[in-house]
Image (tube, rainbow, N blue to C red):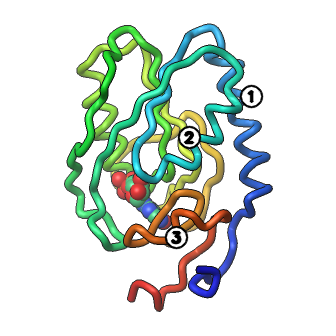
């Protein structure tokens, strides 16, 4: 895998340290609210597993799966829910856990979808953010790292379902997807 990576942006150790900080912030802000962590599959699974173990208070969790990307490196713009909530979120403090905020199309769709189910609040926590790529007006409430406009893999993020198990976050060589 490593030979397909142009440059490492963050090592496993750097990401662990940042997730520790995010977990502490969320514990401070939601520790008495029994929040529901809602992971957006599949990309969230590594971040979610790390983050919830740094949340030092009662909480529950659920997962949704959405697809907007197909197998390429740019969004198709169409969002489809392929796995829905399995719990009622009415009156709950929902913390959406996302791997990366790119155009924002996925999260703005999801936020509207969840708002219709009358949660007490909706908070967005993303590990990575590519602000330059935003097409719709949406921001994360908690963000691990802002990154440049490049296609990245590892720490749960894939290209064509590969590299999710790469432990660092790296920029994928263009020749891999050209
Ligand atoms: P958005 O709807 O454009 O914000 O796209 C969000 C989704 O696109 C993320 O949850 C990822 O699954 C995928 N994505 C966006 N940028 C990247 C990237 O650089 N690497 C891997 N997946 C990405």
Residue 113: x %, y % from top left: 25, 30
Residue identifier under label 3: 163
Of the two numbered discs 1 and 2 in the rendering, the one whose residue sits closer to the viewer: 2
Local secondary structure at mark 1: helix
Q: Earlier in the sequence, mark 3 or mark 1?
A: 1
Q: Nearer the viewer, mark 3 or mark 1?
A: 3
Where is residue 70 shown, x and y percent of the image? Answer: 27, 66
Residue at 59% over, 36% down: 142
Q: Which residue is at the front of the view, 151 or 70?
A: 70
First reached walking from the N terminus: tag 2 or tag 3: 2
Residue 173 appearing in the image? yes
Relative placement, left or right, of 164 versus 64 is right
The quadrant of the rendered image in which ligand 1 is seen is: bottom left
Q: Which mark is residue 48?
A: 2
**Crowdedness near tag 2: few (<14), some (14–19) or many (≥20) residues, C-alpha within 10 Å:** many
Q: Please state the horizontal and vertical placement of residue 58, each as a whole percent of the image.
A: 61, 14
Q: Is mark 3 within 8 Å of ligand 1?
A: no
Tag 1: Cα neighbours inside 10 Å, few (<14), some, or many (≥20)? some
Q: Nearer the viewer, residue 165 or 168?
A: 165
- x, y (%) of residue 83? 27, 40
Let me know if residue 134 appears in the view: no
Q: Around disc 3, counting alpha carbons within 10 Å, would you say few (fewer than 14), some (14 to 19), or many (20 or more)?
A: many
User: Real-space Cα distance between discs 3 and 1?
Assistant: 29 Å
Left or right: 17 as drawn, with respect to 167: right
């Amino acid at each position: 895998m490593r030979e397909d990576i142009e440059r490492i942006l963050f090592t496993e150790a750097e990401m662990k340290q940042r997730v520790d900080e995010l977990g502490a912030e969320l514990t401070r802000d939601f520790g008495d609210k029994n929040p529901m962590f809602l992971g957006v599959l599949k990309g969230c699974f590594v971040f979610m597993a790390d983050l919830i173990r740094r949340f030092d208070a009662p909480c529950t969790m659920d997962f949704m799966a959405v697809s907007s990307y197909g197998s390429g490196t740019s969004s198709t713009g169409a969002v489809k829910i392929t796995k829905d909530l399995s719990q009622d979120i009415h009156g709950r403090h929902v913390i959406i856990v996302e791997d990366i905020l790119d155009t924002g199309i996925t999260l703005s769709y999801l936020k509207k979808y969840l708002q219709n189910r009358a949660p007490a609040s909706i908070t967005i926590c993303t590990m990575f953010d590519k602000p330059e790529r935003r097409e719709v007006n949406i921001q994360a409430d908690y963000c691990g790292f802002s990154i440049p406009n490049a296609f990245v893999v590892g720490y749960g993020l894939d290209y064509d379902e590969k590299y999710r198990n790469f432990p660092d976050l790296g920029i994928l060589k263009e020749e891999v997807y050209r």
